[in-house]
């Protein structure tokens, strides 16, 4: 992929992602590859390159610009920290018109899920390995004190939670990578703090199930942790059991972009 930067702008090209910034404006191109779950490419076929941006595109909350080029698919996003002048819009427009992508598949590789230990009283499992696509990829893993009854990407896993006993635990860990840069190092800790468990999460009709969340950003993938307890205020021994299982999880190595 290549793009000609306007004078005074700076940019970067990485895995499935191109960005150009200057004059308080940002132009981003995010590549997308069809997957078995999302095969339709009709949105990308509505426009033909070269595309052009205008003032309305800088104020839109979602991108309406997408195109296909040499068998590859791209969504365009433009932002400005203040109302862009005509000259700024023109420079962003010329940069977008200069974009070129060579034909080919430059991604691929298996994404292995994390692995929880199958100790006494734990029911563990994982999704199938993912595939590294232009937009990234993800996997899911779990460990529960009751048999797991939901799809790997079902959150919250209600069928399993319905059978979770008061001193039961369900840990769900998603690994993911996006082609768009993620800022910050994450939030909360992978040292489970029961004081931060809450019952008022979306869709929870039970007053007894509580949830602890944590997220951390890593170089190879991001880790999204969900820990469900069978009580609003889990016992210290139950938290310790959950922590021991989490501490023993084995994280995989993912291929670089």
Image (tube, helix red, strand yellow):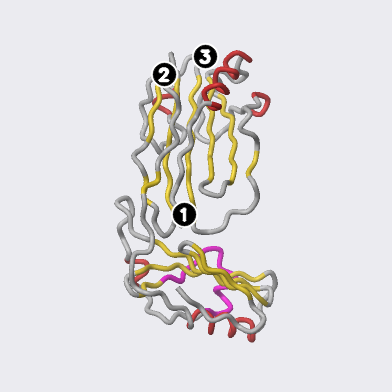
Q: Secondary structure at mark 3?
A: loop
Provide the residue designation for mark 2: 146
Q: Position of residue 19 (x, y in %)?
A: 56, 69
Q: Are the residues tagged 3 and 1 within 8 Å (C-beta)?
A: no
Dot placed on the residue nearer the N-terminal end, 3 or 1: 3
Q: Which mark is residue 256?
A: 1
Q: Nearer the viewer, mark 2 or mark 3?
A: 2
107 in relation to 94, above or below: above
Q: Secondary structure at mark 1?
A: loop
Q: Measure the alpha-carbon separation of dots 2 and 3.
A: 11 Å
Q: Quadrant of residue 67?
A: bottom left
Q: Secondary structure at mark 2?
A: loop
- Pointer 3: residues within 10 angstroms few (<14), some, or many (20+)? some
Q: Residue at x 37, y 79 (%)?
A: 48
Q: Position of residue 179 (x, y in %)?
A: 49, 58
Q: Position of residue 56 (x, y in %)?
A: 56, 75
Residue segment shown in magenta:
53-66
Q: Nearer the viewer, mark 1 or mark 2?
A: 1
Q: Which mark is residue 168?
A: none
Provide the residue designation for mark 3: 166
- Pointer 1: residues within 10 angstroms few (<14), some, or many (20+)? few
């Amino acid at each position: 992929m290549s793009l000609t930067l306007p004078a005074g702008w700076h940019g970067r090209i990485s895995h499935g992602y191109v960005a150009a910034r200057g004059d308080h404006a940002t132009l981003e191109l995010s590549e997308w590859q069809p997957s078995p779950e999302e095969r339709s490419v009709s949105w990308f076929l509505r426009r033909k390159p070269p595309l052009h941006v205008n003032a309305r595109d800088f104020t839109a909350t979602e991108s309406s610009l997408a195109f296909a080029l040499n068998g590859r698919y791209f969504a365009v996003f433009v932002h400005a920290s203040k109302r862009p002048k005509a000259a700024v819009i023109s420079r962003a427009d010329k940069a977008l018109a200069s974009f070129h992508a060579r034909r080919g598949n430059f991604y691929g590789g298996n994404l292995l899920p994390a692995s929880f230990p199958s100790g006494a009283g734990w029911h563990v499992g994982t999704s199938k390995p993912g595939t590294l696509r232009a937009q990234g990829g993800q996997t899911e893993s779990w460990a529960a004190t009751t048999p797991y009854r939901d799809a790997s990407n079902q959150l919250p896993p209600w069928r399993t939670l319905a059978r979770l006993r008061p001193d039961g635990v369900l840990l769900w860990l998603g690994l993911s990578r996006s082609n768009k840069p993620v800022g910050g190092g994450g939030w909360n800790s992978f040292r489970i703090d029961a004081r931060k468990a809450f019952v008022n999460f979306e869709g929870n009709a039970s007053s007894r199930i509580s949830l602890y969340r944590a997220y951390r950003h890593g170089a190879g993938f991001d880790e999204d942790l969900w820990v469900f307890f069978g009580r609003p205020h889990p016992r210290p021994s139950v938290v310790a059991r959950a922590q021991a299982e989490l501490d023993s999880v084995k994280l995989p190595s993912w291929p670089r972009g």
